[in-house]
Image (cartoon, rainbow, N blue to C red):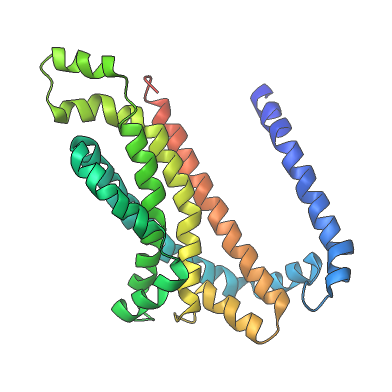
Amino acid sequence: MRSVGKRLLQWLPALVVFVLGIAAWQWIFSPLAGKFLLPRPSRIAQSFWDNHHVLLAAGWFTFKEAFFGFLIGSGMAILTAIAFARWRRVGDALMPYAVAASAIPIIAFAPITNAWFGALNPRSKWAIAAVLCYFPVLVNSLRGLTSVRPEAIELMRSYAAGQTDIFRFVRIPAALPYIFTGLKVATVLSLIGAVVGDYFGGSTLALGVQIENSISLFDFPLGWAAIVVASVFGILFYIGVSLIERAVLRQMPST
């Protein structure tokens, strides 16, 4: 009970800010901006309730696109980080290209993936989400793999351990907190990539298409409701990875 009480106290400031923000939006910002451009939260909630079946189905469809892109981008990033940590000169030579690739605006990359895979093909959205996830996971994973104490490496070598054993028992366990930090960042980016990709062509079942159609038809409450659904899926994705992180790190006394 004490732990539950402490957690509630930790979340209390955020909840207070949330309630005050919604109240200010309802009675201050919406009247100032105009109910048409910035509908009240009550209207958004009503629009969500009236269309929740369509919105939740669209959110699930887009979440699957983001999830597969997350798996592809994060998996490739972790493998690349391991290779860069194992062969440092190769990593130093190729890292600038990874930085340059991460600087490409995703809004410019989305039409290219749609041309490669087809606008209606979910793989085009996987590619966009994977590109967004790749760099933050790579950077955090590489930092964790290369931040191991030299004493631990020397101890493993004194037992005649090879590079595989060093990575398995020292580098990867020590890098897990860094890896999960990158993965948590990637959860949000993957959903952003999937939604942005839908703006340049996608299935009518996708959440990004629902948002674009709603705004083009001046149904702003429905558009905002779809945005809220995207945010909720992103938050749940983040929480899911956080729970996995807690379970994994609990089994790693060294971390």
- Identify which residue is drawn at 25% across, 47% down: 80
Q: Quadrant of residue 97?
A: bottom left
Residue 12 x, y percent position in the rendering? 75, 37
Q: Residue at x 15, y 31 (%)?
A: 164
| Viewer-closest of 183 and 135 | 135
**Which quadrant is the C terminus positioned in?**
top left
Image height check: is 91 above or below 45? above
Quadrant of res 212 = bottom right
Could you tell whether 82 is left or right of 106 in the image? left
Q: Percent from the top left, x then y, of residue 70?
A: 38, 56
Q: Is residue 41 visible?
A: yes
Left or right: 134 with respect to 157? right
Q: Nearer the viewer, residue 239 or 80?
A: 80
Q: Total marks drawn?
A: 0
Residue beneath the point at 37% across and 43% down: 139
Q: Is residue 205 above or below residue 76?
A: below
Q: Which residue is painted at 64% across and 81% down in the image?
A: 214
Which quarter of the figure is the N terminus placed in? top right
x and y percent of residue 150 in the render? 27, 18
Q: Is 248 placed left or right of 215 in the picture?
A: left
Viewer can see residue 61:
no
Name which quarter of the figure residue 197 lies in.
bottom left
In this picture, is 48 found above or below 21?
Answer: below
> Of residues 17 and 12, which is closer to you in this image?
17
